[in-house]
Amino acid sequence: MASREKILENILRNQPPQKTLPDLSKAAIGAGDYFNDFKSILEKIGGAVIEITTLESINEYVQKHYSSTNRIVTTIAELPWFNSDLSDNAHSFEDVDLAVLRGHFGVAENGAVWVTNELMGDRAIPFIAQHLALVIHKRDIVPSLHEVYEKIDPSYDYGTFIAGPSKTADIEQSLVLGAHGPKSMVVFVLAT
Amino acid sequence: MKPGDNMDHAGLSSKFNRDEARVDWHDKTLWFIREKRDKAAWQIPEWEQLREQASQIKENVLSNLHAYLLQFEQHATEHGIKVHWASTPQEHNAIVFDIIHKKGVEKIVKSKSMLTEECHLNEYLAAQGIEVIDTDLGERIVQLAHEPPSHIVLPCIHKKKEEIGELFHQHLGTPKGNADPQFLTAAARQHLRQRFLTSSVAITGVNFAIAETGEVVVCTNEGNADLGTQLADVHIACMGIEKIIPQRKHLGVFLRLLARSATGQPITTYSSHFKKPRAGQEMHVVLVDNGRSERLKSDDFRNALKCIRCGACMNTCPVYRRSGGHSYHYAIAGPIGSILAPGLDMKKYADLPFASTLCGSCSNVCPVKIDIHDQLYKWRQVLVKNGYVNSGKAFGMKGMAAVLSNSRTFKWSGIVGRMVMKYIPFVLNNKFNPWYKQRDMPKPPAQSFNQWYQQNRGKNGK
């Protein structure tokens, strides 16, 4: 405890006079069609965006693009792979090929989707799966991070913005998708 | 370290400069990232306003750090996070070791954290028999090479893919001669996934800690921080006390600036907000001072604490690009490292504020508007005053001052200089002249500006 008091005392003695916070409020951005921005930015950073009208379309897409013999998990009750009990040890999701989860919001300026723990089943799932699919509503795409932080429900325990597949450019700046997490990310955008 | 010592910035740079082709490649690669940053910034019409807001938020943080830290501690504790305080790197390392030791494990995973580099955590834990696996690909590469990172965002930017291929051949058993980035990344993915799955303790850094909510935010592109922590029983997040921000909504400013400034991406792939550990998981946050609370009192150098570790100042720096990160012999290289390091140890890092042209490009790209080049200049004065500059440099400066302060001596020196360069160039073009290293001396002008002006004034009616 000695260090705590020492550090705090030193800070109190040394911190400069109070400076005020800037005003972050700005002119309200009217409702607009941010879908196209969201789509083009997410595609640029290695993700894919598929417009759908019903959740059944996801099933068709998955059958066409992923192997049926591989393990698929989802927390969306309407989808055929739904299993209400994902309370297993996080390590048991090691063999998941595709995870299909709902997201809360999409952010047009950067292609990110806000996902929180109650949508993940297990917190490891969005990261350990080989491929990730997220589902959002078109009406939930907001222009920038400022708007999304206004809308976020603060009751989450763990939340993350996910923008595209896991990636690295650590070897000579060559972009490689699929560093440790999912090798691909598709966002299904429901028309409503 | 005094400028002029063998292992100072200039000495280490000259080693790096021996391989001219590599220097050119290093220079171009980093400039390419600087250009990506520019393109990303230009997409945001309110970019300059964002920088100003970020700067003001950080200044508010520094003026209110005491209250924000207490607020953070209170909220984090309410959410079941154990908060630790460390005055020194040694104390930080001992806290981390104690947590690992209690779990009885010998192998842990760690995602990128410049703070743990600053504290030399890996070496300390290795001495205690704990093996740390760095999971960021670039960090894993330098770890296998037994080197420190050379850049805070791009740890192995100094390495060619062939060297990485050879390292992987030796350590991961990839085929000899294979240097394909896609293939090598896949090999690292296989290798590290096993480590993720078998590690019950995961260490991460912290990009932002929010006073209002007690949560910490960690940004990665690879997903290694999340994969590590979500598969581990214990999450230890290590941070400098200056990483606090007041409210969650301020992330709207910082997350818009961070990745764009760092690599030109609109945002990192993952920006994860850790508020409560999951059921059955332990979470610790270690708050480290290590000189920060002392720096807070300095009007000249306090603002370096605003840094969000984006690396933009390195990518743009003409000296960093041509001397490489290791020439700075400190955990954080480049312009920002050169103003942080002497605050910790003036003697050891006395050379770093001189490793700059003072061109100001670092300050111009800094997303939180740190006056980096002004601080470099101010550090030079502090270092000279305190006798940390060697006699050669001090003598040269005095000679320079004598020449520049007297117009007759100045004129005379110019004439002599031009004649020497014209008629007896070997006097300057030899290894005793530091300006001749890796450079050709310019052709001397036929006359001084003053002579030209005297001849030309009055012409054309002016």
Image (spheres, helix red, strand yellow):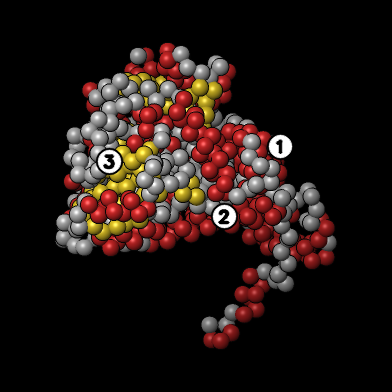
Q: Are marks 3 and 1 on the same chain?
A: no
Cα distance, mark 2 to mark 1? 28 Å
Which residue is found at the position 54% from the left and 34% from the top?
A: B191
Name which residue type carries label 1.
Answer: Asn
Closest to the observer, B121 or B433? B121
Residue B333 percent location from the top left of the image: 54, 41
Residue B148 percent location from the top left of the image: 58, 35
**Quadrant where the N terminus of chain B is found in the figure:** top right
The answer to whether residue B14 is visible is yes
Name which residue type carries label 2.
Answer: Thr
For residue A81, the mark is 3
Which residue is found at the position 37% from the left and 58% from the top?
A: A43
For residue B6, the mark is 1
Q: Which residue is mark 2?
A: B29
Which residue is found at the position 63% from the left and 55% from the top?
A: B25
In this rendering, the answer to whether B100 lies above or below B374 is: above
Cα distance, mark 3 to mark 2? 45 Å
- Quadrant location of residue A20? top left
Q: Is residue B45 left or right of residue B316?
A: left
Please name which of the two marks, 2 or 1, marks the residue nearer to the observer.
2
- Mark 3 belongs to chain: A
- Quadrant location of residue A139? bottom left
Q: Is residue B206 left or right of residue B137?
A: left
Residue B74 percent location from the top left of the image: 24, 24
Which residue is found at the position 18% from the left and 40% from the top?
A: A153
**Label 3: how many residues lie within 10 Å, few (<14), some (14-19) or many (20+)?**
some
For residue A88, the mark is none
Cα distance, mark 3 to mark 1? 65 Å
Circle 1 sits in a helix, a strand or a loop, which is it?
loop
Query: Dots 3 and 2: beta carbons under 8 Å?
Result: no
